[in-house]
Amino acid sequence: MMLRAALLIVALVFSSASIAQQRHAVPGHGTLVLQVPTAWRVADKPLQNPPAIALAMLPAADDSFSLQLTAIWLEPAKRAELTPQAIRDRVQASSRELLSSSVESEAKLAELRGKEALGYYYSLTDRESKNTAGDYKYIAQGMATVGELLVVFTFLHRELETAAKQQALQMLADAAYVKGAPAAEQPK
């Protein structure tokens, strides 16, 4: 039992050392805060109308996955409409568009929940994918609210079981929103 606890502590120390906090400003509407694995390359692009930040994340050394996410600031009336059930319904509807080309006959939704994040996602397998270049065999896709933001994401990957997928989902669950002017720009 003591050995198991010691190994868990070592794993946590090493895993936390490979994560860095990144802040991405949503023009005029605060900041999306993410705990991003340091080995990932990140590019962001602020969008003005609607106010949003688009992010692309890739591994440092290969093309084993591609994470695309967009965090959109929502007017208070739109935020009020995005109940957990409304988000679930939207994610379920988006899954139906991909089911005709997937191995699976149904998309099982999974909850994505953190301190501020609440949403849903699904995972599917592309039946016809060559799994080379920009063609990925596996997809996890969904959306979540984080503070005043709606975060929509697509995680494409080559291997069914990949640690990067779990890291991406954890990063999204741990996402935070800081209202107001963003802190000084940080190096990426």
Image: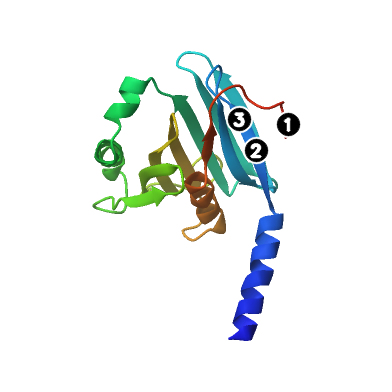
Q: What residue appears at the point 60 percent right and 81 percent down from the top-left corner?
A: 4
* Left or right of residue 63, residue 98 in this image: left
Measured as percent of width and height from the top left, residue 137 is found at: 45, 49
Q: How is the image coloured?
A: rainbow
Q: Picture quarter containing residue 1? A: bottom right
* Left or right of residue 169, residue 98 in this image: left
Mark on residue 22? Answer: 2
Q: Marks 2 and 1, Cα distance to the nearest angstrom?
A: 8 Å
Q: Marks 3 and 2, Cα distance to the nearest angstrom?
A: 7 Å
Q: Earlier in the sequence, mark 2 or mark 1?
A: 2
* Tag count: 3
Q: Label 3: few (<14), some or many (≥20) within 10 Å?
A: many
Q: Picture quarter containing residue 50? A: top left
Q: Are marks 2 and 1 in contact (CB under 8 Å)?
A: yes
Q: Give the structural element (helix, strand or loop) at label 1.
A: loop
Mark on residue 70? Answer: none
The residue that mark 3 highlights is 24
Nearest the camera: 182 or 18? 182
Q: Are marks 3 and 2 in contact (CB under 8 Å)?
A: yes
Q: Are marks 3 and 1 in contact (CB under 8 Å)?
A: no
Q: Give the structural element (helix, strand or loop) at label 2.
A: strand
The residue that mark 1 highlights is 186
Q: What residue appears at the point 56 percent right and 23 percent down from the top-left corner?
A: 180
Give the residue type that dot 1 points to: Gln
Q: Earlier in the sequence, mark 3 or mark 1?
A: 3
- Residue that protrudes farthest toward the right in the picture: 187
Give the residue type that dot 3 points to: His
